[in-house]
Image: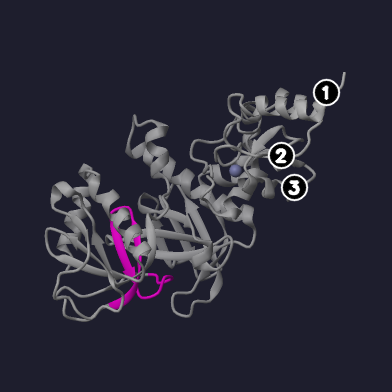
Amino acid sequence: MSVEPEGSNRLLRDVLAAPGNGTCADCGNPEPDWASLTLGVFVCQACSLLHRSIPDISRVKSVQDTWAAGEVEAMAAKGNDAARAKYEQKVPAFYYRPTHTDCKMLREQWIRAKYERNEFECIEKQEPYSAGYREGFLWKRGRDNGQFLSRKFILSEREGALKYFNKQDGRDPKAVMKIETLNATFQPAKIGNPCGLQITYLKDNSTRNIFVYHGDAKETVDWFNAIRAARFHYLQVAFPGAGDEELVPKLTRNFMKEGFMEKTGPKHTEGFKKRWFTMDDRRLMYFKDPLDAFACGEVFIGSQDNRYTVLPGLPPATQGQHWSHGITIGTPDRKFLFACETEAEQRDWISAFQRVIDRPMRPQEYAVEAHFKHKP
Ligand SMILES: [Zn+2]
């Protein structure tokens, strides 16, 4: 019996309405409008483009196209929930699952890990990031000249640190980054490489940045997940009894906002200087250059209950700013004055500050605030 194409497309709409098929199988974006016929999953347009790069495994088709009855039946028999049960059955808790806002490389590697390498059907394939030890070479941006040089890195859960070496013999680490304070976030645009990874850590309570990449996308993502795995195991020991759902959000974090603003000094008479700002949870850092290793300064942003405020505009007598969209941050110690180039930037920064200020401080954040106060 053959069904007319219109009839098939009506049946396809019913399949799309089935549980699990309402969001993209790979990034969770709502209302997917593409399908992989071979894998039997519904995906968003952005993910369908990534599926096209693995045509041997995934053949895609728009849900707007004309569908044959047999194709619809095949999709009905599979679907997103069934694919998840097969291709994601052994995803480790620490493994990063990208969303539609993540960079293309991270989303593409997730798709390849699932369907091309079948990494989550067999845990032996997860060794590169789950073993608790990883060593290899990464291209690291030089602090002084900005050139990327090949450096040996060693991540060791046992030693509680990520280290890198300028010498090939692996002696005398140039930096020892404690897993306790380590963070990693993909920054392809800022670093100028699709695999660009920014690693931050604390030294003497100040933030340090390094910028790295690996020429191979899978290797870069394996390093990222190895850092997450090491952090996961560290946090499991530090917070015994805490569940995965509590620990996983703490493994790595993306910055709340970054961009240029102008700032003035503590007396508000020094003139405004353009700086690169990074808002990392409650730390507002500013740099001369977006790729600097050290911040020129860091400001702790506490909560409303502790007398932190954010307001649009600057005090009336303020002078010296080139940009006209001001922001005033109040802290218990002093006021910080910033100027943004556009109204949209001002609005985005205020909303980022407001989100942090509206959130009550956790006990350990009081200790962080105290460190800031003791700084000269
Ligand atoms: Zn998607």
User: Against 274, is 77 above or below?
Assistant: above
Which amino acid is tagged 1? Val
Instruction: Measure the C-alpha gap from mark 1 to mark 2.
Output: 17 Å
> Closer to the camera, 115 or 244?
115
Residue 255 occupies quadrant: bottom left
Q: Position of residue 361 (x, y in %)?
A: 21, 45
Q: Position of residue 189 (x, y in %)?
A: 52, 65
Q: Position of residue 12 (x, y in %)?
A: 71, 28
Query: Mark 3: which secondary structure?
Result: loop
* Residue at 70% over, 42% down: 117
Q: Which residue is mark 1?
A: 3
Let me know if residue 284 is in the magenta part: yes
Please identify the residue farthest to the right as the structure is shown: 1
Instruction: Measure the C-alpha gap from mark 3 to mark 1.
Output: 31 Å
Q: Which residue is mark 2?
A: 64
Whether residue 92 is visible: yes
- Magenta range: 273-293
- Ligand 1 within 8 A of label 3's CB? no
Figure quadrant of the C terminus = bottom left
Query: Mark 1: which secondary structure?
Result: loop
